[in-house]
């Protein structure tokens, strides 16, 4: 009996991994290096002075129709996703980068039904940390199915 459950678990896990790999290797829109000034952070200084944030967004969707037709109506304009990131980064302050990334991901998925998943990376290049670094940040991957959780 245990062996049967184990085989089912392995098959389910393998199927989930295959679906994840298909998602990662599928078509996507890419926005990289979007730069904004925002007031996010847990420290009072961050909320008063603000700081630079850099955002990358990958949005997975089927781009075949747009590739064939060459019509913007068959895809999503990059500016639509840019505007979502801009509104959130320059909008209401959040304590955590995790919250900023989550808001970008959820808004993108909610506003654009064609998108099956979105990856959001939020970087803080100027942080009060002793020692050299390029940035600190977060990166999340949200699938459409995550919206129902």
Image: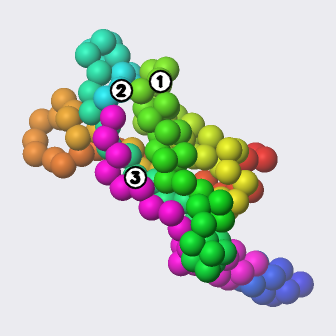
Q: What is the secondary structure assignment of the residue under circle 2?
A: strand
Q: Please determine whether, in this image, residue 78 is positioned above or below residue 41.
A: below
Residue 74 appears left or right of 81: right
Residue at label 3? 56
Does the stretch in magenta take in 78? no
Q: CA distance from mark 2 to mark 3?
A: 15 Å
Residue at the location (53% across, 78% down)? Answer: 25
Residue 34 visible, this angle: yes
Q: Where residue 92 sits: x, y (%)?
A: 49, 20
Residue at label 1? 91
Image mark for residue 38: 2
Residue 62 appears left or right of 90: right
Q: Where residue 87 sits: x, y (%)?
A: 49, 31
Residue 146 visible, this angle: no
Tell me where the magenta segment starts and ends, as one range.
12-36
Q: CA distance from mark 3 to mark 1?
A: 17 Å
């Amino acid at each position: 009996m245990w062996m049967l459950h184990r085989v089912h678990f392995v098959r389910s896990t393998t199927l989930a991994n295959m679906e994840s790999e298909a998602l990662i290797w599928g078509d996507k829109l890419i926005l990289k290096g979007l730069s904004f000034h925002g007031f996010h952070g847990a420290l009072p200084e961050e909320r008063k002075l603000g700081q630079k944030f850099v955002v990358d967004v990958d949005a997975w969707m089927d781009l075949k129709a747009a590739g064939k037709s060459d019509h913007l109506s068959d895809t999503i304009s990059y500016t639509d996703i840019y505007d979502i990131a801009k509104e959130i980064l320059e909008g209401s302050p959040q304590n955590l980068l995790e919250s900023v990334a989550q808001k970008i991901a959820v808004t993108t998925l909610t506003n654009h039904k064609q998108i099956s998943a979105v990856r959001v990376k939020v970087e803080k290049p100027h942080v009060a940390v002793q020692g050299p670094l390029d940035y600190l940040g977060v990166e999340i991957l949200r699938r459409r199915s995550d919206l129902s959780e």
